[in-house]
Image (cartoon, rainbow, N blue to C red):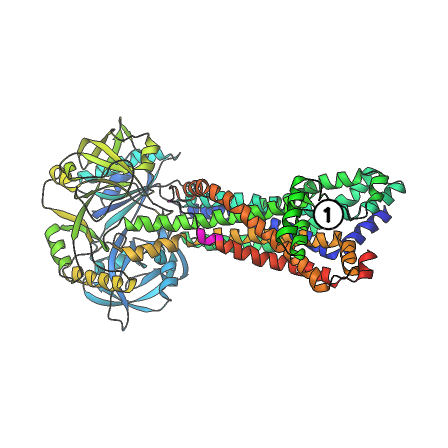
Amino acid sequence: MNTLWHKVRADLWLSKSRSLLAIASIAIGVFCVGTLFGMIDLQLSKMDAAHRQSQPSHINLILRGDADNGLLERIKALPGVAGIDSMTPVTMHFRRSGQTEWTLATLMIRPDYTDQRYDQTGLDSGAWPSSGQVAVENLSAAFGGFNISDQLEFQTVEGTKTLPIIGIVRHPFVKPPKFGGQPHFFADASSSALFGVPANSFRQLLVQITPPYSADRARAVAVDIRNLLARHQLAVNVSLLQDPDKHWGRPFLAGVNGVLKIMALVSLALASVLILNTIAAHIAQQTDQIGVMKALGARTSTIAAVYFSETLLLALVGVLLALPFSLAAAYFSSCQLLGLFNIDCGRFEVSKRAIYWMVLGGLLAPVLAAVGPVLRGASMTVRVAIASYGLGADFGYSRLDSWVERFGARFLPTLHAAALGNLFRRKARLVLTQGVLILAGVMFLVLMSLITSLNLTLDNEMARSRYAVLLGFSIDQPESKVVEIAGQIAESGKVEVWRRLPMEMSKNGRALRQKGSLGAQLLALPADSKLYRPLIEAGRWLNADDAGQRRLLISADSAELNGIRVGDWLDITIGAASQAWRVIGTYRWLAGGNPTVEPVYASLETLRDITPGPEMASFALIDAPITDLNREADYLRRLKQAFQQQGIELNAYATQAKLAQRQFARNQFNPVIGTLSGLACMIAAVGGIGLSGALAIGVLQRTREIGVLRAIGASSKAVYRLFMLEGLLQGIVAWLLSLPLAYVAAEPVSRQLGEIMLGIQLDFAFDWWAVGYWLAILSMLAWLASYWPARKAAGLTVRESLGH
């Protein structure tokens, strides 16, 4: 056994280049598996842990006005209510000392920061705000460069007041500023009068229901609370239901994680193919040694044990090499994605499941890949093994070989013809190498097409918005006044007003479920609206004939959730009145991973008939000839100033400019695009390592042949060019074969991944630029992969080659 162990060590040490290639192949596959599975576990576990730690409310109601705290006890007494908490969001303006322009922001007022019950705000640094002080949310602090002790000026009912930042806090429901969210500040109840908030009042209600939690029970309790509030003339703008154990952003990351799992398994499969190729070549090179061992009495099992031991040792080194880098990459990548949801990554952690898969996959996959070559080599007879001189191949016995030979002789120079023939000499290795490169190419092109389709979907969604600016008002405003103020700005063109009303939808007495995480609301717009039209999935959009008719459109996702089809009738409750409305269409809705209110579209004329009174506006859509972000920002600033001077408060969440919103949407999906791009690069790297390994093995197996070439007069330069051409031909063939496969696979895969990751069907576009990129990348990979094997082949002397 000591002799056999000595052979294992000698094989690994004397063939260092082959051993390093095998280790690199295993390490990169294990790295991908550990990183991706580690990201999956850390993201979801940290996300859910942060969610539970915040004591999430089961029901979150945002009111349209101020409610007296006296109602809290009556709400708490409702059946099914276990506890309540309250807070007040206020839209206000601030600026740094010395600046002239005011910035729109949101101020959150909580009664007592030391006695928070639900949706708790955490203190990151500094202290809780008290009278005459504010705290800043950590995302806003990082984006705006705010620090503790900074002095900011705020517009208050008493005029401009300078308040210091006393602390930095973290809130579970804040849209990041780079995704279009407003800066968020926090104050206590003693500061509420400064911002026009009545004492002992609230605008946001947080409720937990009695256990056990279920969405249906929470929805029923929410209806009871809204009915109670309606009896006190208090309307609810937004209703949010959330699972107490699962973070609201989980579906978004769960979709991304589904892609990561596929990529992890693909990476491990590619690494296994490389190991199969390496071991097969190693066995082929040592057939004469196997014959000698058999002649000396070695059994088949003993020889198999030698080569399995070599494979296991290589796999163990590869796993140990990849383990620390993979765990670190999983942690830091998870932190980056968790930051999108304002979740503190906390201390360094590792995923036990990722370690398990790394060790199991990293050791088992190479051994399984080696089973075929090892058993074939170990079962050779002495005669077959010793008769092999390492020069054999399977070229020249098929019609394909004859065609390749004739083609090369007729159309190619001698050196190029030899390289083409060498490409097909060992077809089994060619198939394995091409399989790795083709799969890498297909995955690269599919992922790049997915990114292109995602960008196209965002562009098309923005193109359907024909307005320049959307203004949302904290309180509904007279329509004529809104149109008059907007028209005062020089660039303003057509102004279209919309009305928003809370509502309840049901069918056959059962409340409907919505895709929107913040519930649904009725958006009433002119029946002949020209400034916006969503993508219609079924049925049709509103037209002039729908004015005065009870007809509506709902999202295709909600229609599917509730089994609703075009032509069905729904019971719609607006205020105290409930009427039957007909569904005339469904639209596709790009919600992404944010908490979002789902629109239900109806005609403004119908709403005016149902709710008589003055014509009011919740939103104003304004068309303007603006084509760049700077002009858009200036136009929006002047609009805000004009409305502010008239005492009209804009809603920080609902006010947005189209070009900026497109940029925010791209920022939101950049982490997903970055992840997919990184995976594409990893797969390309695996393909490059596979090609390099195949060429290096070819040099080892053809050492004697190289000696013969040198002996008959071939120069070092000619040998070098021969192997470089072979590597480039491998790359070109793989590129050509991957194109039709990628073109066929890209559309269904992109559409499926779009539904998994984003819950939508993407507008597909094949990325033809990526075809050129992949050719350039593959050519570079082929050059790099061929360089060292070709250089080694060119440096071999005749004596070294023939004495091999």
In the picture as drawn, the residue positioned furthest to the bottom comes out as 98
At label 1, counting other C-alpha atoms closer than 10 Å, the crowd grade (few under 14, some 14-19, many 20 or more) is many
Specify whether residue 165 is in view: yes
- Report the span colored magenta: 762-771
Task: Choose between 727 and 448: the one closer to the eye.
Answer: 727
**Residue 437 x/y as whole percent:** 58, 49
Horizontal arrangement in the rendering, residue 704 relative to residue 352 (left or right): right
| Quadrant containing the C terminus in the rendered view | bottom right
Seen at 19% across and 37% down, the residue is 574
Horizontal arrangement in the rendering, residue 627 relative to residue 421 (left or right): left
Horizontal arrangement in the rendering, residue 497 relative to residue 120 (left or right): left
> Which element carries disc 1, helix, strand or loop?
helix
Q: Dominant secondary structure of the magenta stretch?
A: loop
Task: Choose between 660 and 122: the one closer to the eye.
Answer: 660
**Residue 630 is drawn in which quadrant?**
bottom left
Seen at 67% across and 51% down, the residue is 694
The residue indicated by pointer 1 is 281
**Residue 470 x/y as whole percent:** 23, 53
Task: Choose between 708 and 684: the one closer to the eye.
Answer: 708
**Residue 490 x/y as whole percent:** 16, 63
How many badges with numbers are in the image?
1
Specify whether residue 351 is in view: no
Q: Is residue 646 magenta?
A: no
Q: Is residue 766 magenta?
A: yes
